[in-house]
Image (cartoon, rainbow, N blue to C red):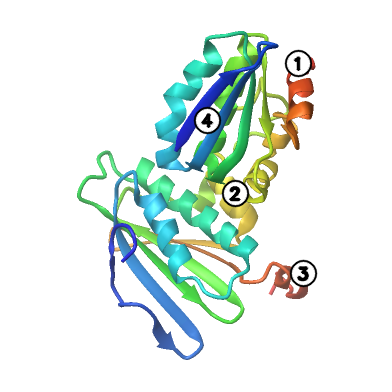
Amino acid sequence: MQLQHEDLEDGVRMIRLDGRLDLEGSEAVDLKLTSLCGTRKGFVIIDMSGVEFMSSIGVSVIVRVARACMARQGRLVLLTPRPNVHDVLVRTSIDQIIPIYPDLPAARAGVMTPA
Amino acid sequence: MGPGGMDILGGIADAGTMHVHERVFPADRSAPRAATAWLRSVMLGLSASRLDDAELCLDELVTNVIRYAWDDPGGHVVTVRVERTPLELTITVEDDGRAFDPRQAPPPPPAHSLDEAIPGGRGLMLVKAIAQRLDYERRDGKNRVTFGFYRDRATIDRVPTDR
């Protein structure tokens, strides 16, 4: 599981995940992800396009960091999950509480929109 | 050989139209990944989306076992058995940990906002949403959880489920 991040000029933090968000993968990125979402204003886009697989453990991590962003008056949104990962977000109804965007411009606009 | 574990039946045991595969995995953090990689290596004739479903259910059940079945999973194993008939696929996960009937586990409360959303508890919710049946038995000090579903998503609409 790999994690990269970059800060965009408008203060939005972009995090890209690659690999499997299963038990091992989630444990591998959990601390890093939590600290990346907890140290700034809390406007975060997670690029999910490199995530091959996500189980409920991965969902838990995403929910937890989304709550951390919200606690900082920020917002977390997801960008382009693959169909199997999107299915998991829909089946757990997480798509109802964490916005998912199909492209970067939409995600950048969405992350700054008050919930 | 795939990651972790060993073949018990040495591949396919052909019992008429039923194909059975079984493998034992060390009960450690890598077991969910090893079990799903093995599943992908043995499954034949499933559509890509159905294979995704099977992989997710197996990952969830093995993950639950690794996290909750023992205080210390060291030295224990998880056995996975896959049975394939023309219509149905069943997967059984067996462990010798503390008794746990997944059918009795309450679903997480529905979250209407991020405020109310609790992070965990969605694994069995996913399995129950995907599988057509979920069985459990406790025998000889072992948990045996079996989930089954039609191999083809389209079959769900054609076959009455109340028989």
Q: CA distance from mark 3 to mark 1?
A: 42 Å
- How packed is label 4: few (under 14 Cα within 10 Å), some, or many (20 or more)? many
| Mark 3 crowd level (few <14, some 14–19, many ≥20, 10 Å Cα) | few
Are discs 2 and 1 less than 8 Å apart at CB? no
Q: Earlier in the sequence, mark 1 or mark 4?
A: 4
Q: CA distance from mark 3 to mark 4?
A: 34 Å
Are the residues flagged by discs 1 and 4 in contact, CB closer than 8 Å? no
**Which amino acid does the dot numbered 2 rest on?**
Leu
Disc number lying in front (3 or 4): 4
Read off the residue under disc 1.
A112
Q: Which amino acid does the dot numbered 1 rest on? A: Met
Q: Secondary structure at mark 1?
A: loop
Q: Position of residue A61 (x, y in %)?
A: 52, 30
For disc 4, the chain is A
Q: Are marks 2 and 1 on the same chain?
A: no
Q: Which residue is mark 3?
A: B157
Of residues A104 and A91, the one nearer the viewer is A104
As drawn, B60 above or below A41: below
Q: In the picture, which quadrant includes the N terminus of chain A? A: top left
Q: Disc 3: which chain?
A: B
Q: Which residue is mark 4?
A: A61
Residue at numbered disc 2: B126
Comparing labels 2 and 1, the label whose residue is closer to the camera: 1
- Please tell me which residue lies in front, A3 or A56: A3
Describe the element under mark 4 as helix, strand or loop.
helix
Q: Amino acid at mark 4?
A: Val
Outermost front residue: A9
- The residue that appears at 43% across and 23% down in the rendered structure is A31
Secondary structure of the residue carrying numbered label 3: helix
Q: Label 2, label 1: how many angstroms apart (C-alpha)?
A: 31 Å
Instruction: Determine the residue positioned at 51% across, 17% down.
Output: A36
Q: Is residue A41 above or below residue B84?
A: above
